[in-house]
Image (spheres, rainbow, N blue to C red):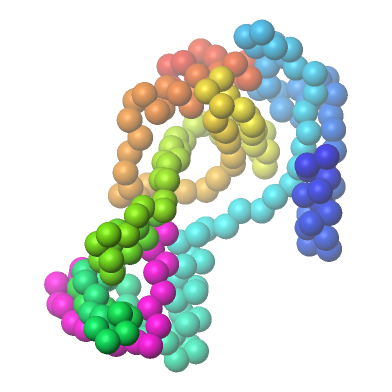
Amino acid sequence: MGLKLYDLVAGSRLLHLSRYYSAQESVELFPTLARKGKDRTLKGTVVYYDGHMNDSRVNVGLACTAALAGAAVLNHAEVISFLKDEGRDRIIDAHIRDNLTGKEFDTYAKVVVNAAGPFCDSVRKMADKDAKPMICPSSGVHIMLPDYYSPEGMGLIIPKTKDGLVVFMLPWFTTITMLPEPNEDEIEFILDAICDYLNVKKNLKSGE
């Protein structure tokens, strides 16, 4: 029902209708899918379609679009303090550091928007040291597996693991970048979570 609502919300932009596949059809579509796992047997699957995006490129595109509309854009910079209009207790200035050059400067604005994502609480505390946290952060771990774990163009979603979490195995394109690395416990958790659903257990457990 949820996926049919998903189809409905997509409207004219829907890629394809979601549909149910029997256990036999599922294994034919997804050969590495296990028919049996711990205390469970494959009864069928539901396939739905979605798109993906490169979020870093979206951010760059947003910044370029803003610049074309007349905005002054500065990348690789951070706010390190605020200045308030004491009479109205309103932020009128942000003190900024350019992390590429180390240069610091002030910028004035009628309105300051805190769009710092998971770091917004630290920005709020710059404005009000007594501000109570409003973010409950959680981390997502990503690992790369060989392409033979899933058919081309298809992935796998485990909506609820034994720990009540969600695991996605999705086809993706990527390059190696300087990003935080997951620890071994997190890698083992992901491998253990999908191991019970695939028939390539030897490679999964070895992490190859």
- Coordinates of residue 23 in the picture (x, y in percent): 81, 20
Decide if residue 40 is in sight here. Answer: yes
- Coordinates of residue 14 in the picture (x, y in percent): 80, 56
Image quadrant where one finds the C terminus: top left
Q: Is residue 8 above or below residue 95?
A: above
Q: Residue at x 41, y 41 (%)?
A: 139
In screen coordinates, is 42 left or right of 112? right
- Coordinates of residue 130 in the picture (x, y in percent): 27, 59
In screen coordinates, is 158 left or right of 58? right
| Residue occupying the far bottom of the picture | 70
The number of numbered discs placed on residues in the rendered structure image is: 0
Image quadrant where one finds the N terminus: top right
Is residue 22 a member of the stretch shown in magenta? no
Q: Residue at x 26, y 80 (%)?
A: 84
> Where is residue 142, by image quadrant?
top left
Q: Residue at x 66, y 22 (%)?
A: 32
Give the magenta range.
98-117
> Where is residue 161, by image quadrant?
top right
Nearer-the-camera pick, 113 or 96: 113
Decide if residue 93 is in sight here. Answer: no
- Coordinates of residue 183 in the picture (x, y in percent): 33, 30
> Where is residue 155, by image quadrant?
top right
| Residue occupying the far front of the picture | 87
